[in-house]
Amino acid sequence: MKKNQHVVPKGKDWAVKGAGNERATAIVPTQAEAIKIARDIAINQKSEVVIHRSNGIIRDKDSYGHDSNPPKDKKH
């Protein structure tokens, strides 16, 4: 099942959680590490990565599935 991967703060660390999951897939010390893990999972599942700020607010999204309206930027 395709689940969007969320990069969320977890205490002083960062967690990668599949949408709707109670438990984290991974907990790592930096947001950059969490983004890499989430991106690899999303590419494999053809889903999205949703990156949150340390206060929990969404700061960015990247889609790795079939997107009928793909973004013009290539930042990630």
Image (cartoon, rainbow, N blue to C red):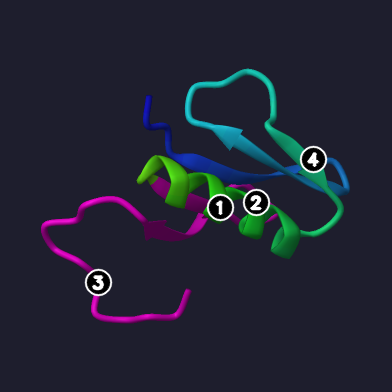
The magenta segment: 48-76
Badge 1 amino acid: Asp
Q: Is residue 74 above or below residue 66?
A: below
Q: Secondary structure at mark 3?
A: loop
Q: Residue at x 63, y 18 (%)?
A: 22
Distance from disc 3 to disc 4, alpha carbons, whole Å, reads 29 Å
Q: Which residue is mark 3?
A: 71
Mark 2 Cα shell of 10 Å, populated few (<14), some (14-19), many (≥20): many
Viewer-closest of 54 and 69: 69
Going from the N terminus, do you reach mark 4 or mark 1 first? Answer: 4
Of all residues shown, which one is farthest toward the top? 22
Q: Is residue 63 left or right of residue 32?
A: left
Q: Secondary structure at mark 4?
A: strand
Q: Position of residue 26 (x, y in %)?
A: 74, 38
Mark 3 Cα shell of 10 Å, populated few (<14), some (14-19), many (≥20): few
Q: Which of the labelled discs sits on residue 40, or is there none? A: 1
**Does the rendering let one see residue 57?**
no
Badge 4 amino acid: Ile
Going from the N terminus, do you reach mark 4 or mark 2 first? Answer: 4
CB-based contact (under 8 Å), mark 3 and mark 2: no
Q: Position of residue 51 (x, y in %)?
A: 54, 55
Q: Which of the labelled discs sits on residue 27, or is there none? A: 4
CB-based contact (under 8 Å), mark 4 and mark 2: no
Distance from disc 3 to disc 2, alpha carbons, whole Å, reads 22 Å
The N terminus sits in image quarter:
top left
Distance from disc 4 to disc 1, alpha carbons, whole Å, reads 15 Å
